[in-house]
Image (cartoon, helix red, strand yellow):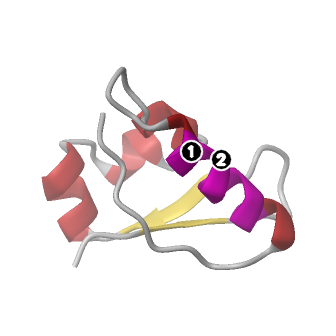
Amino acid sequence: DAFCLTNPRLRDHPIVLVSKGFERLTGYESKFICGCNCRMLAGPATNPATSKRIHNALDRGESITTLVLN
């Protein structure tokens, strides 16, 4: 499984934990991605509606499962 967890209680909802599967899938080691916002995963092929759904879920303190293309 590939997943990351963020902390919505901290400014800008930083990533605080990533799975080994996430590291393999993205190519980012946890030491480089923890502390960053999930926006860093977005690229030119990322659908803006997907980004908005993630943003809204984080603002509401809800979990979300989605596919992000970058």
Counting from the top left corner in percent of width and height, residue 54 is at: 61, 57
Between the residue at mark 1 and the residue at mark 2, the CA separation in whole angstroms equals 5 Å
For disc 2, the neighbor class at 10 Å (few under 14, some 14 to 19, many from 20) is few
Establish if 28 lies above or below 63. above
Counting from the top left corner in percent of width and height, residue 50 is at: 51, 49
Q: Residue furthest left?
A: 24
Of the 4 image quadrants, the one containing the N terminus is bottom left
Counting from the top left corner in percent of width and height, residue 69 is at: 30, 42
Q: Secondary structure at mark 2?
A: helix
* Disc number placed over residue 52 in the picture, else none: 2
**Left or right relative to 5: residue 18:** left
Residues 4 and 52: in front is: 52
Quarter residue 46 falls in: top left
Q: Are marks 1 and 2 in contact (CB under 8 Å)?
A: yes
Q: Amino acid at mark 1?
A: Ala
Residues 57 and 26: in front is: 57
Establish if 23 lies above or below 70. below
| Residue 21 visible in the snapshot | yes
| Residue 35 visible in the snapshot | no
Q: Amino acid at mark 2?
A: Lys
- How many numbered discs sit on the rendered protein? 2
Q: Is residue 44 magenta?
A: no
Q: Please state the extent of the stretch shown in magenta in the rendering.
A: 49-58
Name the residue: 19% across, 68% down: 21
Counting from the top left corner in percent of width and height, residue 8 is at: 78, 64
Establish if 41 lies above or below 63. above
Q: Which residue is mark 1?
A: 49
Residues 66 and 36: in front is: 66
